[in-house]
Image (cartoon, rainbow, N blue to C red):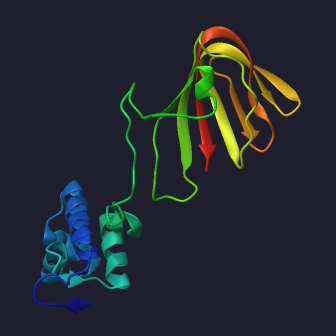
């Protein structure tokens, strides 16, 4: 292990320090008690918890065993800067698609711009202004989950009577879309991969 003047400068040391402090406090252990459990010195525990040293793999393993957690628990939070998309109820951007001209509303429920092949969850609303329209075709798969109303949904040569709670997973290459709108308004969740 390497001891330096001040923090080692890596991103993992402060994360490991915080996790060791957290799990030690959770177990009600003093630094001296953790040192005794792990075979490390109390001074080493102090340097680890103040992020002024980098731990070897062996030291990490001893800490994890002494804290009774998996080694990976000591790294929790080190990879926390990932893209996320949060949408409040009733919010989300309304997108224009080919069905929009037929009175269908598409509300995007989240978008991850920097994640390749991310899914695209959309809340689709069909009202009395909606019409049946030509079927869609696109690469990838699509998952539909009925929330309200009822309709007949076509996919390839098949038709599915969909009511709240029903779901349909389909290959987007085959022609698909609403064939008959039975009970309005109709709302369903459409999740499509890009």
Q: For the point 13% across and 76% down, which residue is it?
A: 46
Q: For the point 33% across and 77% down, which residue is it?
A: 60
**Residue 53 x %, y %:** 20, 83
Q: For the N terminus, which image quadrant?
A: bottom left
**Residue 110 x %, y %:** 45, 41
Left or right, 29 with respect to 159, comes to: left
**Which is more toward the observer, 6 or 111?**
111
Q: For the point 12% across and 82% down, which residue is it?
A: 43
Task: Residue 176: name its quadrant.
Answer: top right
Q: For the point 60% across and 25% down, which residue is it?
A: 101
Left or right, 46 with respect to 67, comes to: left
**Which is more toward the observer, 25 or 10?**
10
Residue at the front extreme, as displayed: 101
Residue at the right extreme, as displayed: 157
**Residue 11 x %, y %:** 27, 74
Q: Is residue 86 above or below residue 79?
A: above
**Residue 138 x %, y %:** 71, 45
Q: Is residue 64 above or below residue 165?
A: below
Q: Is residue 153 above or below residue 66?
A: above
Task: Residue 163: name its quadrant.
Answer: top right
Q: Is residue 105 above or below residue 33?
A: above
């Amino acid at each position: 292990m390497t001891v330096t003047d001040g923090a080692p400068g890596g991103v993992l040391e402060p994360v490991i320090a915080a996790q060791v402090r957290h799990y030690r406090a959770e177990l009600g252990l003093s630094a001296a008690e953790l040192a005794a459990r792990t075979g490390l010195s109390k001074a080493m525990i102090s340097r680890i918890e103040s992020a002024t040293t980098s731990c070897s793999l062996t030291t990490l393993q001893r800490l994890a065993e002494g804290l009774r957690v998996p080694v990976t628990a000591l790294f929790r939070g080190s990879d926390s800067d990932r893209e996320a998309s949060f949408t409040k109820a009733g919010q989300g951007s309304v997108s224009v698609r080919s069905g929009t001209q037929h009175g269908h509303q598409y509300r995007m429920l989240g978008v991850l711009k920097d994640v390749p092949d991310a899914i695209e969850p959309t809340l689709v609303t069909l009202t009395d202004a909606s019409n049946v329209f030509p079927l869609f075709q696109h690469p990838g798969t699509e998952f539909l989950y009925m929330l309200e109303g009822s309709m007949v949904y076509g996919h390839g040569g098949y038709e599915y009577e969909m009511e709240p709670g029903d779901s349909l997973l389909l290959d987007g290459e085959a022609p698909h879309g609403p064939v008959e709108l039975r009970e309005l308004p109709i709302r369903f969740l459409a999740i499509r991969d890009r």
